[in-house]
Image (cartoon, rainbow, N blue to C red):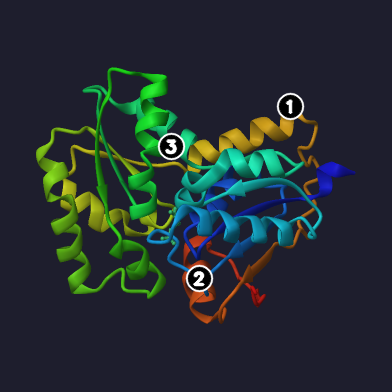
Amino acid sequence: MNALKSIALLDSGVGGLTVVKEIFKQLPNERIVYFGDTARMPYGPRPHQQVRGFAMQIIDFLQTQDIKLVIVACNSASAAGLSWYQENVVLPVIGVIEPGARAALEHTKTKRIGVIGTTGTIKSGAYDKAIKKLDPEVKVFSQECPLFVLIVENNLINARETKKVAEEYLGPLKESGIDVLILGCTHYPLLNEVIQEAVGPEVRLISSAEETAREAKEILINNDLLNSNSDNSTHHRFFVSASPKTFVEIGEKLIGMKVKAYQVIMP
Ligand code: DGL
């Protein structure tokens, strides 16, 4: 019975949908319930304690939705307190930082890894710690890119200024000799093209989505929670804390399916 429950994902907005896309690919039988805290995004500039409070409030809501696993599909919220959510929630909870670090280590040859993320994620040093725990010899070059989330949430991906902003943020990283760059914010894969252009074709971009979905699958298998029922009538649920309009527009393009999102006002 538990296997029929949903996988819950949360983010400050549309970013976590990059993880949803990968879940659909690797776990096609699973039903998801998603929460985008669009009224309170961006999380990046906020103090960790506040982000932790928001995330916990959302997890509490998601737990009323018949779920079996929580994916904190937001680097800022993961950096703000993944272990804290794990201690306070009975269900398994995973984040996106360790999967991203693992994926980067798999691909680096020079052991020079770049990380971009929100101010909160970069200042937390969460990626440095996760990478160095796995391989202390790696050199990590970090850069915060606070405007990227706003660019994505305001549907400005193709605006002329976006390219300039990317060049400004990523110029120094290009000079540092990195061979992989971790997109340490789930919004950033939506800017893949512009980021790739700014760092050059020889740098491999790493999104944690793929590795996170793999970890989710492993947890479901190990806990006998994998849904083996391939009934196509599965319906997914999307919730947002502000008006759903832009979320739906960006979301449908990203995951390639009709999205109906409901607004839930957060106190
Ligand atoms: N997708 C969130 C992350 O991965 C965005 C953070 C924000 O709202 O600033 O960090």
Asked if the residue under mark 1 is in contact with the one under mark 3, i.e. CB atoms within 8 Å, the reply is no
Give x and y (percent) for residue 194: 24, 58
- Residue where numbered disc 3 is placed: 100
Q: Please state which amino acid type lies under the numbered disc 2.
A: Arg
Q: What element carries label 1?
A: helix
Mark 2 / mark 1, whichever is N-terminal: 2
Label 3 beta carbon within 8 A of ligand 1? no
Mark 2 / mark 3, whichever is N-terminal: 2
- Residue where numbered disc 2 is placed: 40
Residue at position x 32%, y 69% in the image: 151
Residue at position x 50%, y 65% in the image: 13
Q: Please state which amino acid type lies under the numbered disc 3.
A: Gly
- Residue where numbered disc 1 is placed: 222
Q: Please state which amino acid type lies under the numbered disc 1.
A: Asn
- Compared with 214, 159 (above or below) is below
- For the residues labelled 3 and 1, the Cα–Cα distance comes to 21 Å
